Amino acid sequence: MVAIAVRAVSKVFGDGATAVDRVDLDVASGEFLVLLGPSGCGKSTLLRLIGGLEEPTRGEVLLDGVPVTAIPPQERNVALVVQTFALYPHLTVAQNIGFPLRAAGGSATDVAARIAEMARHLGIADLLGRRPEHLSGGQRQRVALARALVRRPALLLLDEPLSNVDAGVRADLRGEITALARRIGVTTVYVTHDQNEALSMADRVAVLRRGVLQQVGPPAQVYADPRTLFVAAFLGTPPTSLLEAAVYAVNGRVVLDLGSQEIELPPGDPRTAALARRHTERVTVALRALRPATDEPVQLTGTVRAVLNRGPDVLAYLDTGGVPTPPQVVDFPAAGGRSPERTPYGFVPAYDPEVTGEPPPAGEVLVRIAAPGTVAVGARLTAGLDLGELLLFDRAGRRIGLDIIS
Ligand SMILES: Nc1ncnc2c1ncn2[C@@H]1O[C@H](COP(=O)(O)OP(=O)(O)OP(=O)(O)O)[C@@H](O)[C@H]1O
């Protein structure tokens, strides 16, 4: 096992594209770290930089304190498995798994024992005589993992290894990979764009956007306590609802005006001081799926626009009449919006001057209704709001009041 230190690493490709932008990251020995982010955010490039397969333009990567570029490839003891891992078609499963050991001059007995051990770990002992063409996608990735791990690498790098595998098998393999990495003791960096995969597998998850590291932490923490609007929007099943609000903060009263409804923060809410400085500003309110109202002091009412039955629950798409922030979280301050209008509190919010054009569709929040409950399209529905779970972001996508909360 090896500890990874990424120090102020940037990677700029020949065409000028910055794939990785001043990333600092530490991965402890034996840790399972997942790099998460949308397509093109630099995950694979960062993984390759960690493995020493790419050289940083600036900064350096150290494995157990030694810069990787200083270590010859054959001595790096790094194994990489990618999405479409090529097995040798003319070799059997056993020969494929044993290939790296034979290439390194291992004895026949030792090679056979290690093949049997890896095959047992990955549940493919009955496939050893088959050729890759007679394997399913999931079985092939098991063989690829066995071949990567048979050399007992100190560092395992996995680049979307399950994206070509059927959904059911993928769920099984997620659990097996994390259990196996822990059992055999290998530091693992796993790349995915799938938040569920990341949250279910990682000891810690590192979220990347456009080459910039947004946040690193245990899955539950990154989910519950996102530092940026991007992280809040990227993590959420069902998707996080994002609404625009104008801040009214006068005489100790703090109201988030959503257009047709409002959320008033109670006196003493830890975010009050931060919001008091933002009177008349426009902020983004991020809401994870709500529940039908019971006796919460703050509630949102709307018309049910669509209903999605998901088995264990029903998801209602509630039109609250508010203004949405685009879910893809475009670069601020260019987010879509509406023409400036006075709020009921008598001020014109500080909207971005460049915003013009059509008013966006009305803001929608998702309400999760426990099965077997249901709700009709067109019905009025009131959702309850837990203010402790309300996330607020400024126009640069930074969390408001985080300094107070954390
Ligand atoms: N060899 C290369 N030459 C030029 N640009 C590259 C090269 N490799 C990656 N890039 C660019 O760097 C950026 C990051 O790419 P990278 O493959 O690391 O992203 P990713 O998050 O892994 O995406 P995906 O999930 O789609 O694989 C992209 O804009 C990509 O086009």
Image: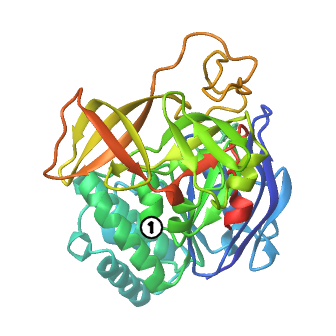
Q: Taking 323 as reference, is 89 left or right?
A: left
Residue 278, horizontal then vertical, whole percent:
76, 41
Residue named by callout 1: 201
The picture places residue 296, in percent across and down from the top left corner, at: 40, 55
Q: Nearer the viewer, residue 230 or 271?
A: 271
Q: Position of residue 20 (x, y in %)?
A: 73, 48
> Residue 196: which quarter of the image?
bottom left
x, y (%) of residue 167? 28, 52
Q: Secondary structure at mark 1?
A: helix
Mark 1 nearby-residue class (10 Å; few <14, some 14–19, many ≥20): many
Q: Is residue 341 visible?
A: yes
Q: Quadrant of ligand 1?
A: top right
- The residue under the point 37% across, 79% down is 118
Q: How is the image coloured?
A: rainbow
18 left or right of 44? right
Which quadrant of the rendered structure holds the N terminus?
Answer: bottom right
| Residue drawn where x is 52% and y is 84% of the image | 185
191, above or below 351, in the image: below
Asked if residue 259 is positioned above or below residue 131 in the image, the reply reads above
The residue most toward the front is 251
Question: Where 243 sits versus 219, above or below?
Answer: above
From this viewpoint, is residue 132 visible?
no
Who is closer to the viewer here, 313 or 66?
A: 313
The C terminus, quarter of image: bottom right
Residue placed farthest to the top in the image? 357
**Residue 176 is drawn in which quadrant?**
bottom left
Q: Which residue of the protein is positioned furthest toward the left in this rendering?
A: 372
In this view, 224 is above or below 285 = below
Residue at (32% x, 83% y) in the render: 116
Residue at the extreme right of the image, as rendered: 58
Which one is in front, 168 or 389?
Answer: 389
Three-letter amino acid code at the position of disc 1 = Met
